[in-house]
Structures are given as structure tokens and as C-alpha cells.
Image (spheres, rainbow, N blue to C red):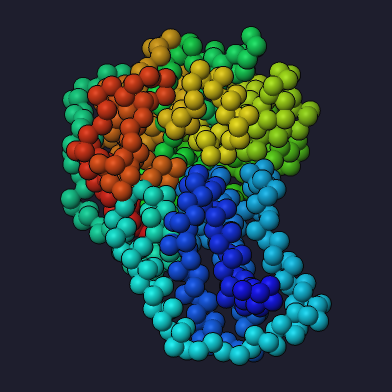
Amino acid sequence: MSRESIAHFLKKPFVLFTIILLLKGYLAWAVTFGDWLPWKVLITELPFIWLLFCLIEWFSSKRKLMNYTIVNLILTGVFFAVIMYFKYYGVIVTYHALAQVGQVTEVKSSVFSLMDPYYLLVFADIILLFVLLFKSRRVKSWRISIKQKTRKSIVSVVFMLCLVICLFNILPNRASMNEIKKAQQMGILNYEAYTILSLKKEPLVPLKDITQASIDKLKGITVPETPKYFGNAKGKNLIIVQLESFQNFLINLKIDGKEITPNINKLANENLYFSNFNQQVGQGNTSDAEFVVNTSFYIPPDGAATQKYVDKKLPSLPRLMEANGYNTLTLHTNNVHFWNRGELYSSLGFQHYYDQTFFGTDDMVFFGASDEVLYEKSTDKLQELDQEGKPFYAQIISMSAHHPFTIPANKYKMDLPERYQGTFVGDYIRAQNYADYAFGQLMDELKQKGLWDDSLIVVYGDHMGLPIYSLDHDDKKLMEEIYGHEYSYTDMLNIPLIITGSGISHEQIREEVGAQSDIMPTVANLLGISMKDHIHFGQDLLNQTYNLLPERYYLPTGSFLNDNAMFMSGSGYEDGTQYPLSGKSSIGQGTTKEEYDRALKLLQLSDSYVNQQPKK
């Protein structure tokens, strides 16, 4: 074949754009699946691409090149979104994430921090093509030369063949539980189309069949008639502090002999500290943590709770506390419209919320006033409430240690060792060191204002700060130094829970495995408030030793934790993987298929129960 004939062949839009999009597909596969698998990309992505190209060849003539360019732009956007979303969440993006577009501008610094410069190469051809389309005479003549239509019989054969291959990729893999495996088996573009076109919805379980007894049976627990510690903090204020991106490894961590979080260390070492505690958030991250903690329900199967559930009047901790004579409020320095929190707080039944309009914009760190301002103004407000003669429930949401953790230099409270300088892990540790400094001020303020001794205080992390898939080689090496082993999924999910207050047994490291849905029943027991008539999916950690904790989003559907191990689903249970819990070297007795089935049923019951709650 002559050079001229090769050049003529490559100039055909069908061929040229096939090569361009295959290269982009290879990049997306390398980032998300960790493998180029050139043959797999060819049999999954190529047929879908050619389906669209066949439609162009069928129906286009005058604007054929422009239509190819538009399809290229759309599919490039899909591949780029898949790459960036995976780097942050570790899952495959779907059309449900379009509801998050409004949040992206708020967290643009987080998005840019995840971007390796070479990712932007996926747009290089698009920029070049648009310039050439309008500026180059040669391209104008090329546009004229490709106007002739390809024989429809050939296009039809290619179209039907590609459609059959696409269906062959999609149909046998629909039952796979693991969304990443499903996307790899189907192909990224096939998977995206499948999620849009799939009409399958999990049937709702009737409300009459969702009882606390049925939930407890699925969880494998028996609630004692006379629970230990019931009412030990009766009548006390409840203060729940949610720490931004705070992972458990920070507790008692020293780097070159220096404590990173001395104030929180002291609190953990002198009070109830649950070291095997875990996150249960999803797409909504911090706002999902607020939802789970205040309802003891699980996050929705797709989307954030603030997008899916806020039209409901939700049974909640604020409503339970109000029914028992408490004032209720939540405090956050960001704008209440971010993550639709105004609607969330209405659904949860908080009597008052305080956001940026209350805290102002002085001493800004990321999206709002610093944690120092948050804690100072929050304790002033709590002191006002305390003088009304009623107990209060206040949830305080910290934010200064937010991804990407590049706090202002005037907030530095420590010098990083050289090996941590300029690293993602180093920025995270310095931000959490500052967050701990501010938290120390909160403890001092509560004590000075007479609130500390009269309150049950709960402190926990909202979600991970260091996703495995966001770390580069140097960051992973630092995490291995910190842990003494390779940083794992169970380490990533592990957050602390600390409970303190008069009447609470002190200086206890509790080994019970728990998660955010367990906070509500645990504090209700301590406050002497019964939850027998209040459906909940968590359990009182002070009266149970076994736990079954379904996980979603950051882990594939079907994943769960028990008191031995973490299970990550494959296509189902049989090809899943078990991991030791954080801090353990073995999986012990591991997990069972029966627990896997029960965990899925628990998720279905939670979804069914929330979706059938009355409109607010």
C-alpha cells in the first residue's frame, strides 16, 4: 500500500476518530482499571464508538466532520469524567453525578489537585480540530471531499455487528454487584449507556414488613431488656462534633517524635474511644455523614442523601431529642445551600441552623470561616441556649481540614519533615494538625463556659481524607511508613469515634466494630432515651459485640464489614475478596455468604423505609 493510499485512508473521519477515541479509551482504562488490556478495549469500547459513527454515516453529509467532532467531544467528556471521578471516589461515574455539577465550582481546588497534567491531553485533538475547521483551507477541502455517503449496505452490516457485540458485552454482565467490574466487563461506554437505559428498580418492601425486630434479626443481634449504661448521661446536653476528613490513624500518631493531634489524642486516651469505627458515606461525603448520623439509615443507592431524600419528613435524632424536651441546632461555616443542606436540615427536623450568614467570612479557610471562628461563635451560641433552662442537641461541622488540605501558611502549627514537604499526605497531616489546634480551643471554650461537665460530647470523623486511588507513589510510601504496612481499603474507611461526659466510663479503648449509623442508638442509650418505637439500622455499641455493616459507594455494592473482616464484592459473593480490618493482620473467621445476603437485605429495607416516609 502506497504512502498516499495510507494517508487517504487515515483521512477518513471514521478511521481518524476511531484511532483518537481508542487512545482516550486506553487512558481511561489505565487509570480506572489499572491495566491497558488493549484487546479488551477493542472488543468493548470500539463497537459502541462505531455504533455512533454508523449513525453519522447514515444521516450526515453536509456537516459530517462537525458531527464526528461533536461525538468525539461528548465521548471525550465521558472518558475524562470517568478518570477524574475515579481519582476522587474510586467508583465509575454515571449520569446520576450530573446532580453534583453545581457543587463542582465550590470544590474546584479539590478537583484540580487530583489532575495529572497528562489527563488534559484528551482534549488536545479537539482544540486542534476546532482551530483547523475554521482556519485551514486544506481542512475545508477535506470537508468537501468527505461529503459523499458511504454505501448504506456496508454501514448497516457494521451497525448490526457492533450492536450484537455491545449487547453481548452488556447482557451477561448485568447481574454483577461490583460496579467497577461491571464497567470493565461491559466496557466504559456500554456501562454508561446501560445505567441510563436500565429501568430495573429494586422493589420496595411494604412498611408493615419493616420492623425493628426484623432489622435486628438481619443484623444478628439481640437487644437486651436492660441495656448497660442506660441513662448514664440523662438530662445532659448532647454535642456532636463532626471532624472534616479525620481518619483514625491520626490518633496518637507521631512523626519524628512530634504528636500530630495532641488535643484529640488526650480526649481519646482519657475517654471512650472506638478504634474500629468506620465511615458509611457516599456521593454526598460530609452531608451524607450528617444524614447517616442523624437518622441511623443508610445512604441511597445512587446520588447524595441531600439530593434523594430531602423531600421526606425523616424520623431523626433531632426529632427524637425535641420530643424529649431538647432544643436542636446544627452549625456549619459554609453556605447552607452547598449540598442542599437547607433542605436536609428541614427534613431532619433541626429547629435551627447556623451557616455562613451567622459565622461571616472573616478568617476564611476554603469555603468558610476557620474552625477557630466556628468553635468560638458556636460555644457563644450554646452558652445562650444553656441559659434558657432546656438541654440542647448541637451538631458542629468542622471544615478547615478539607481536601486538598492546602491551608493558608498563617495556619501552620507545625514544621513538616523534608520527606513530607510538597506531598498530598504532608498537606493532609499539616491541615489536621491545625484542625486539632482549633479543636483544643473548642474544649477550652466549653470548659470555660460551664458546658463541658454538663454535656455528653461525641466526636467522630466524617469520611476518609486520603483515598487510595488519589495517592501517587511517594504518598503511598509515606502511608506505608505510617502504618508499617501497605495502606489498605480498611485503613481508608477507618475513622475514630470518641465519647466523653460525666457518668461515662473513662479510659477505655473499645474494640467493637462500628460505623456512623451506630452513633444515634449509642447516644440515645446513654441519654436514657428509648428507641424501641424508632426504626434504626445501627446498634448501641456499648451493648453489642457483633456487627454487620453494609457499605456503599466507596466500596462496590454488596460490600460489608463484620467483627472479623471486610468483604468487597465481585460479580457476587463467590468471587469477592476479604480484607483484614484496620489494625489486624488476618481476617480471623472472615465473612460468610449468609452475611452477604443479610447485608443486601438491610440495604433494601433502609431504601424501602426512607422512600415510603411522608412528604414534608
* Side (left or right) of 443 relative to 223: right
Residue drawn at x 38%, y 45% as measured from the top left = 556
Place residue 558 in its image quadrant. top left
For this view, does 488 lie left or right of residue 21?
A: left
Q: Residue at x 42, y 16 (%)?
A: 272
From the image, which quarter does the N terminus lie in?
A: bottom right
Q: Is residue 239 left or right of residue 144?
A: left
Identify the residue shown where x is 72% and y is 71%.
129
Residue at the farthest front position: 1
The image quadrant where one finds the C terminus is bottom left
* 445 relative to 576, above or below: above
Instruction: Establish if 72 lies above or below 507.
Output: below
Examine the image and state in which quarter residue 293 appears: top left
Report the residue at 78% width, 29% height from top: 409
Q: Position of residue 18 (x, y in %)?
A: 56, 69
Q: Percent from the top left, x then y, of residue 430? A: 67, 25
Percent from the top left, x then y, of residue 119?
A: 65, 51
> 476 or 505, which is in the foreground?
476
Q: Nearer the viewer, residue 578 or 275?
A: 578
Q: Is residue 487 above or below residue 59?
A: above
- Any part of residue 187 in sight: yes
Any part of residue 318 in sight: no
Measured as percent of width and height from the top left, residue 449 is found at 60, 20
